[in-house]
């Protein structure tokens, strides 16, 4: 899945092309462009919303300001301190090389690197640009960065705890928002908006609890709510992109309409979450207990009745046996009395 990130350091940038353009790049975005005539190498540091396992890095260069080479370095920090990129220890994981293109070629170049890196920061060290007729100020630029991998939830929890124990403001100063933690990152990577991601996590926890209690009817009900929230979250994420695009075009009527659709979906998700949190009332629980007690009492009565019937049956059999025995004993006596006469 694609991992969201925040640019926490950048050596330079041009007006209109700040590094924040890389946070949510669009086809119409200019991306990041260095300042004119910068010193090299130029560095950019990305911070992930937790500890991640990176398996692929894809970089789309600027159409005209193409760096000749980009060194990639993974950064990690101790769990005992806030995750600051200035205190991170970096290790080289590989590099990307770009090729020179002719003046008639349109669009940037995409280069990809397969890696196995566990980190919370990623540093890009970019070399001088390749020659291009339209690059008059010796600049370099990146249109888009896609980092793919997975989030280490357990390690991310430790990292957040370090930041929250008196050192959280340092994270904020370096561009990491504690409210946009690894849970939100996980939601975005799953293709849903932040609210949907939180609701899905809560519903999944409730569903797992129901499965542990073997309350499969409740687990089935929660699964249906989970599907509804997931679909709504995916729709909201797409609508958010449509709204931003409409605002960029200054088509505010469309933006207003899209916002209304988003609000309706948010209301629907909140209703699903309230439904998921619904628990059987105490009265209902009491009724269930009473039904169970009544059933147990009925079974006990049926058991006692069965025992009584069995006893009566045995008594009758014993009585029949005694009668037969008495007849057998009396019959020879009658025969002897007749023979004497």
Image (spheres, rainbow, N blue to C red):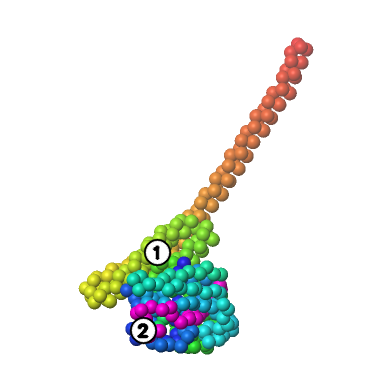
- Image disc number at residue 230: 1
For label 2, the residue is 136
272 over 316 or under it: above or below = below
Res. 283 visible in picture: no
288 over 246 or under it: above or below = above
Q: Which residues are magenta?
A: 117-138
The picture places residue 328, in percent across and down from the top left corner, at 72, 22
113 over 41 or under it: above or below = above
Task: Please name whichever residue, 8 or 215, is drawn nearer the observer in this view of the structure.
Answer: 8
Cα distance in 3D space between marks 2 and 1: 48 Å
Task: Please name whichever residue, 283 or 328, is drawn nearer the observer in this view of the structure.
Answer: 283
Q: Secondary structure at mark 2?
A: loop
Count of numbered circles on the image: 2
Question: Which badge, 2 or 1, comes first in the chain's sequence?
Answer: 2
Q: Quadrant of residue 238?
A: bottom left
Q: Secondary structure at mark 1?
A: helix
Residue drawn at (49%, 58%), measured in percent from left and top? 215
Q: Is 137 in the magenta?
A: yes
């Amino acid at each position: 899945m694609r991992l969201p990130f925040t640019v926490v350091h950048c050596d330079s940038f041009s007006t209109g092309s700040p590094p924040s353009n890389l946070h949510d790049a669009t086809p119409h975005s200019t991306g990041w462009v260095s300042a004119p005539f910068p010193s090299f190498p130029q560095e950019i540091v990305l911070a992930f919303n937790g500890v991640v396992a990176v398996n692929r890095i894809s970089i789309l260069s600027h159409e005209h300001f193409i760096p000749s080479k980009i060194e990639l370095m993974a950064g990690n920090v101790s769990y005992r301190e806030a995750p600051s990129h200035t205190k991170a220890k970096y290790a080289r994981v590989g590099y990307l090389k770009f090729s020179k293109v002719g003046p008639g070629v349109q669009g940037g170049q995409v280069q990809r690197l397969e890696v196995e890196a566990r980190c919370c920061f990623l540093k890009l060290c970019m070399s001088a640009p390749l020659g291009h007729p339209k690059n008059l100020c010796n600049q370099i630029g990146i249109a888009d960065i896609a980092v793919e991998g997975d989030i280490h939830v357990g390690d991310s929890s430790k990292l957040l705890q370090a930041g929250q124990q008196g050192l959280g403001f340092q994270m904020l100063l370096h561009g990491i928002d504690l409210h946009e933690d690894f849970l939100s990152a996980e939601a975005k990577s799953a293709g849903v908006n932040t609210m949907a991601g939180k609701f899905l996590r809560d519903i999944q926890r409730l569903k797992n609890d129901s499965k542990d209690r073997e309350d499969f009817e409740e687990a089935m009900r929660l699964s249906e709510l989970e599907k509804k929230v997931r679909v709504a979250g995916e729709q909201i994420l797409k609508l958010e992109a449509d709204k931003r695009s409409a605002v960029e075009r200054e088509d505010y009527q469309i933006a207003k309409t899209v916002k209304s659709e988003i609000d309706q979906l948010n209301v629907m998700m909140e209703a699903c979450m309230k439904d998921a949190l619904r628990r059987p009332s105490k009265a209902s629980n009491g009724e269930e207990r009473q039904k169970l007690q009544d059933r147990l009492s009925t079974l006990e009565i049926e058991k006692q009745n069965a025992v009584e019937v069995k006893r009566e049956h045995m008594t009758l059999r014993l009585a029949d046996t005694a009668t037969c025995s008495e007849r057998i004993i009396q019959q020879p006596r009658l025969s002897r009395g007749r023979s004497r006469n």
